[in-house]
């Protein structure tokens, strides 16, 4: 058992020495590298710095996402499908929604609805809905609406530091 372990250690050292000699520069001397190149190599291969740079990019994207969620225009598809014992109900459409600085939310949706009833002609209608919401007490005001944006910005600045 001990001899096997010694052989493995010897084989490992010989392999490492062969690898090092294969990568050594010609003539047996040291590599010539300027200070800028050495710093560049150290920065390129430092995992903590690479992780920090990726974190900063992620936090910047999170800040942009918070800005879009606070005041952005969102356009989403809408759909509904239902089946009952006597009828089928299908609806498909598009919804656009925007939120103002004081929390006012305005949404406009357009859809086509089709209702199929057994033994009757299919009913098809188009509909347009407009919704306006204004919070009076909770989540009211620009400070409350901008709080996620400010928090994301502070996180991004802390990551940059």
Image (tube, grey):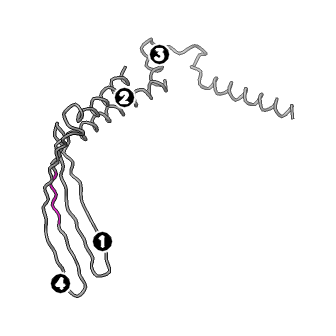
Mark nearer the viewer, 3 or 4:
4
Given residues 118 and 75, the one toward you in this image is 118
Magenta region: 107-111
Query: At x 81% / y 32%, what residue is drawn?
Result: 5
Q: What element carries label 4?
A: loop
Query: At x 13% / y 65%, what residue is drawn?
Result: 127
Image position, residue 124 (x, y; %): 16, 74
Q: What element carries label 1?
A: strand
Q: Earlier in the sequence, mark 3 or mark 4?
A: 3
Above/below status of 69 relative to 118: above
Q: Which residue position holds label 2?
A: 56
Q: Which residue position holds label 1?
A: 82
Q: Which of marks 2 and 3 is nearer the N terminus?
A: 3
Q: Distance between the residues labelled 1 and 2?
A: 45 Å
Above/below status of 39 relative to 96: above
Mark nearer the viewer, 1 or 2:
1
Count of numbered circles in the view: 4
- Quarter holding the C terminus? top left
Q: Distance between the residues labelled 3 and 4?
A: 80 Å
Name the residue furthest front: 137
Q: Which residue position holds label 3?
A: 38
Q: Which residue position holds label 4?
A: 121
Mark nearer the viewer, 2 or 3:
2
Residue contact at pointers 4 and 1, CB within 8 angstroms: no
Q: Which of marks 4 and 2 is nearer the N terminus?
A: 2
Q: How far apart are marks 3 and 1 (CA)?
A: 66 Å
| Magenta run includes residue 85 | no
Image position, residue 139 (x, y; %): 24, 38
Image position, residue 76 (x, y; %): 23, 54
Q: Earlier in the sequence, mark 1 or mark 2?
A: 2
């Amino acid at each position: 058992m001990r001899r096997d372990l010694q052989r493995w250690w010897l084989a490992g050292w010989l392999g490492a020495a062969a690898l090092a000699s294969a990568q050594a520069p010609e003539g047996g001397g040291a590599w010539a590298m300027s200070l800028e190149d050495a710093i560049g190599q150290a920065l390129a291969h430092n995992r903590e710095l690479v992780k920090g740079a990726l974190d900063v990019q992620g936090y910047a994207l999170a800040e942009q996402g918070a800005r879009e969620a606070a005041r952005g225009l969102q356009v989403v598809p809408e759909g509904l499908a239902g089946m009952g014992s006597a009828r089928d109900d299908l609806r498909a459409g598009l919804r656009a929604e925007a939120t103002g600085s004081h929390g006012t939310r305005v949404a406009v949706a357009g859809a086509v609805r089709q209702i199929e009833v057994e033994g009757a002609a299919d009913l098809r209608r188009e509909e347009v809905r407009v919704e306006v919401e204004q919070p009076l007490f909770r989540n009211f005001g620009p400070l409350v609406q901008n709080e996620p944006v400010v928090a994301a910005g502070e996180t991004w600045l802390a990551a940059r530091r």
